[in-house]
Image (cartoon, rainbow, N blue to C red):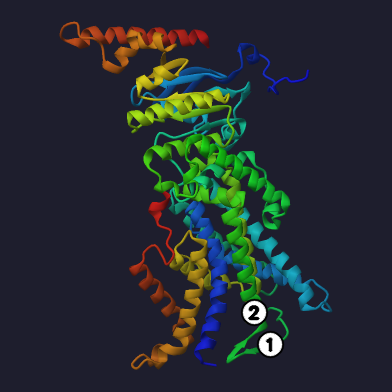
Amino acid sequence: MTTTIPQQPTPADAAAGGTLLQARGVIMRFGGLTAVRNVDLTVNSGEIVGLIGPNGAGKTTFFNCLTGLYVPTEGTVSYRGTVLPPKPHLVTKAGIARTFQNIRLFANMTVLENVLVGRHTRTREGLFSAIVRGPGFHKAERASRERAMELLAFTGLADKAEHLARNLPYGEQRKLEIARALASEPGLLLLDEPTAGMNPQETRATEELVFAIRDQGIAVLVIEHDMRFIFNLCDRVAVLVQGEKLVEGTSEVVQNDERVIAAYLGEPFEGAPADEDGTPAATADDASTTSEQENDR
Amino acid sequence: MHTLPQQLANGLFLGSMYGLIAIGYTMVYGIVQLINFAHGEIFMTGAFGALAVYTNLPSSMSIWAALPLMLVGGAIVSVLIAVGAERFAYRPLRNAPRLAPLITAIGLSLALQQAVFNWYPHATAGKHFPQLPGGPFHIGSVDVQSGDLFLLGAAIVCMIALGVFVRSSRTGRAMQATAQDPDTAKLMGVDTNRIIIIAFAIGGLFAAVAGVAYGLKYGQVKYDIGFQAGLKAFTAAVLGGIGNIYGAMLGGLVLGIAEACATAYIANVPGMEQFGGGAWAQVWAFVLLIVVLLVRPQGLLGERVADRA
């Protein structure tokens, strides 16, 4: 017992090759609308998992369930074998960090300050030490700043540390969101459309960044509409359609799945009217997935 | 007595007090977008808390020894009431329509006033508040009371401490983050409920300091002093740009000085003779507010609502 990695006690899940995140039977209802229906999803350590689906499929809602912003109506989300409390700050503390579909930086704070806020859960400071400002305070503050600068260097923003976040160009704001999320030293990073609105070069750079993050031992769960990005990047892809998980598998499996193509492009036309051919097929698929999931439960 | 430096000094002292109270309005507004109308009463209970400590101290004790204890006593009362109000009155309404907590605040304000009126012994009339010995000091042509010096000193110390705390501590950064976007702050690991409590507590603390200073300055406290002081402080917070702590202090000073100068000089303006004097001081204070808001709706230092989008 010399150099074992300090692992959390995860009795059952440890066997599964380090399951980080496990969502089981997550259902999210808003009044009469069911935005997420019975979704199961697992992310193992070292994996990059994609979550795709047409607009309104419930991807972001599902993310919000994972991060404690919403409390799922039914189902559980556990991280390293422990069920997550429905409090976003405790989820972050447990080790899940995220970025947002619409950039949500602290616009009036500097780039560095944004990252420092990200470090909030990993720093300790009482009210007393903040007022007295002893050597411990300065040491902790300096360590925090050093780590924040490292992250800015990692994302390529080091020379902009003192700029106001709102003055950064769009692509760099996205990067800053990632740096801020990484500052909480997560085991799992959730990216909500990280390349939305980016040009191909920026998308390529983001791809590199996500690989680099994975190489640091952080698993990534990413929502994206850019299919090339997803299929280049992900070890596994799950497809969400109308709140339900339609397919899950490797890029090839998902790419070639007819149901996925149908969900995105509609049913293939085999003569008019298309509806008569399309509708029964879709219903059959829905029925089969639902029953599968019910069996799982 | 009516020299300009004297009026500026009077305004400075008055304004320091407005500013100290205004901090409570502006911090709470900045973080939860609530105008805590009970804050004037938190100021008042701070004064009474300090007075209660004083009356229970041995009468042989010098005021200088008693003052720190009074401050602590007042602060405990104010902070407990402020934090209690947040926990039990405002937090359950956090997601309710904006009007609900506002009305709650007004109700709380009346309740606190009546509580002191009915339960504090003999609070129906003004209660005598101890005075600091010494003074008046003559600084150039300006007469200064020792209570005024305490007020100014307390305001300076509080403001510097707050500025440093907000700008460069971990909790202060979390506060700024929560003010800008509470949901994101939560997801970055900030316990926003704790931050909100801290904001209320700091507001309560400053209000208590202002309450003690009020007692020392005017020599008596009454159950209803919170209303007018609170209204003025709220005005100061809006004047400076609500949500901005430096704005609150600046707004307080501008309001205090404007009030002092209006009292002394308006009557000298031809045709305005009847509008001078203390009776019209309130009017001029609010005229100033209206004029500033017409020209700069976001207040002097401005915390534009768009900034928090």
Chain for mark 2? B
Residue hosting label 2: B149
Which percent across, then down, holds residue B212?
A: 66, 72
Residue B36 position (above or below residue A96): below
Q: Considering only order in the chain, which callout, 2 or 1, is on the residue closer to the N terminus?
A: 1
Which percent across, then down, holds residue B295?
A: 34, 69
Q: Is residue B116 visible in the rendered structure shown here?
A: no
Q: Nearer the viewer, residue B241 or A142?
A: A142
Q: In what element is the residue under mark 1?
A: loop
Residue A196 quadrant: top left
Q: Is residue A200 visible in the rendered structure shown here?
A: yes
Residue A37 quadrant: top left
Estimate how packed mark 2 is, as few (under 14), some (14 to 19) or many (20 or more) residues with alpha carbons within 10 Å.
Answer: some
Residue hosting label 1: B135
Which percent across, then down, holds residue A122?
A: 63, 38
Q: In what element is the residue under mark 2?
A: helix
- Residue at (74% x, 73% y) in the render: B67
* Mark 1 vs 2: CB contact within 8 A: yes
Query: From the viewer's perspective, is A143 left or right of B278?
Result: right
- Residue at (71% x, 72% y) in the render: B51
Quarter occupied by the N terminus of chain B: bottom right
Residue B294 position (above or below residue A229): below
Query: From the viewer's perspective, is B272 left or right of B207?
Result: left
Q: Residue furthest front?
A: A159
In 3D space, how far apart are the residues under numbered discs 1 and 2 (Cα atoms)?
10 Å
Which percent across, then down, holds residue B286?
A: 41, 74
Q: Amino acid at mark 2?
A: Leu
